[in-house]
Image (cartoon, rainbow, N blue to C red):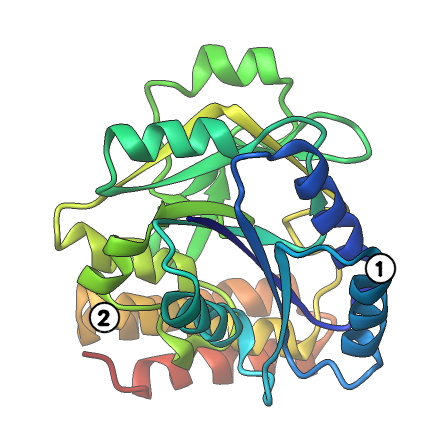
């Protein structure tokens, strides 16, 4: 069984639109699991009413009793599906996306050829049709930063430039993998809460010889932008905390401390007019160094 997972948080309209597009275009998806991450805004009720009205037998709503972030919500769905659906392949899809063609079958074909990999889609802007990323990005760990591949390029330009340059990680916006892989490497680390969860997961998988690959024949459209325009104290704290915690796990505590200083400097320069935001980023960077990792 092929299972799509869609995480909802206070965005029932977008989630329903995403589900409807998958139902219309992705015939090789056998079941769709929507996880409401304790929205407390009526999202779960709205989705349940829509589901009762449409009577889709291949869609299930789960209500996570707590909002434990991207990793926690998706893990909640993964555990439920593993217990109840006998899945063979999973596809994690952001709820603020939609498809206008069968975006899953190319991913499924790639996984059937080699199930020891994560595979992802080209992510396109719903507004412009240009790339938001060629599947994922390149990491610059010492700076705690990443660069999305192909951003703002046309699909044609990206395909000329990027096939030889696979990303360091696949975006969690569209990420497919085998159920067997989750049993081998475990689920996502929920201590991140936000940011770097799928990156950490794929880097842990590399220790098992598992790779990541972009499948250009799979395309999803994304509302808004993957690079957040509005910066908040919340963003700076959790983004920087995730970056340095990631560095501590994969590069060691000394590397993480150096990156915390550099990331704090970058954040301060960017937010020199907003010392409260800069301070949130600094606290997050050093909190990540202090957090435990395995």
Under circle 1, the secondary element is: helix
Residue nearest the observer in this picture, 227 or 12: 12
In terms of sequence position, does the residue under pointer 2 or pointer 1 come before the other?
1
Q: Residues within 10 Å of mark 2 (few under 14, many from 20)?
A: some
Which residue does the image show at 25% across and 54% down from the upper left?
Answer: 181
In what quadrant of the picture does the C terminus appear?
bottom left
Q: Position of residue 225 (x, y in %)?
A: 71, 46
Q: Is residue 258 above or below residue 156?
A: below
Q: Position of residue 265 (x, y in %)?
A: 48, 67
Which residue does the image show at 26% across and 86% down from the upper left?
Answer: 292
From the viewer's perspective, is 141 left or right of 47?
A: left
Mark 2–mark 1 distance (CA, rounded to whole Å): 38 Å
Which residue does the image show at 45% across and 38% down from the upper left?
Answer: 120
Residue 293 quadrant: bottom left
Q: Position of residue 125 (x, y in %)?
A: 72, 35
Q: Residues within 10 Å of mark 1 (few under 14, many from 20)?
A: some
Q: Is residue 264 visible?
A: no
Residue nearest the observer in this picture, 48 or 168: 48
From the viewer's perspective, is 284 left or right of 177?
A: right
Q: Position of residue 284 (x, y in %)?
A: 48, 81
Give the label on residue 13, or none.
1
Q: Is residue 213 above or below residue 68?
A: above
Which residue was labeled with disc 2?
A: 249
Q: Is residue 201 visible?
A: yes
Residue nearest the observer in this picture, 213 or 262: 213
């Amino acid at each position: 069984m092929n299972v799509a997972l869609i995480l909802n948080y206070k965005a029932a309209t977008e989630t329903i639109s995403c589900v409807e597009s998958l139902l219309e275009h992705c015939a090789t998806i056998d079941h769709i699991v929507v996880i409401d991450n304790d929205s407390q805004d009526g999202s779960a009720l709205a989705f349940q009413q829509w589901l009762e009205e449409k009577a889709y037998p291949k869609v299930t709503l789960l209500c996570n009793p707590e909002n434990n972030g991207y990793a926690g919500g998706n893990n909640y769905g993964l555990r439920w599906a593993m217990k109840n659906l006998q899945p063979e392949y999973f596809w994690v899809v952001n709820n603020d996306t939609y498809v206008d063609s069968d975006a899953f079958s190319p991913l499924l074909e790639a996984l059937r050829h080699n199930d020891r990999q994560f595979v992802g889609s080209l992510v396109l802007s719903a507004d412009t049709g240009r790339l938001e990323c060629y599947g994922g990005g390149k990491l610059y760990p010492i700076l705690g930063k990443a660069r999305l591949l192909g951003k703002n390029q046309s699909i044609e330009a990206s395909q000329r430039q990027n096939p030889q340059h696979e990303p360091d990680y696949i975006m969690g916006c569209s990420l497919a993998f085998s159920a067997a892989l989750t049993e081998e490497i475990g689920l996502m680390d929920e201590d991140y809460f936000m940011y770097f969860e799928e990156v950490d997961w794929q880097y842990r998988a590399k220790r098992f010889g598992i790779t990541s690959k972009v499948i250009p024949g799979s395309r999803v459209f994304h509302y808004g932008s993957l690079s957040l325009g509005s910066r908040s104290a919340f963003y700076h704290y959790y983004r920087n905390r995730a970056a340095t915690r990631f560095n501590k796990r994969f590069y060691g505590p000394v590397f993480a401390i150096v990156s915390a200083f550099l990331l704090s400097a970058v954040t301060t320069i960017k937010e020199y007019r907003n010392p409260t935001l800069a301070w949130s980023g600094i606290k997050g960077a050093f909190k990540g160094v202090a957090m435990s990792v395995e």
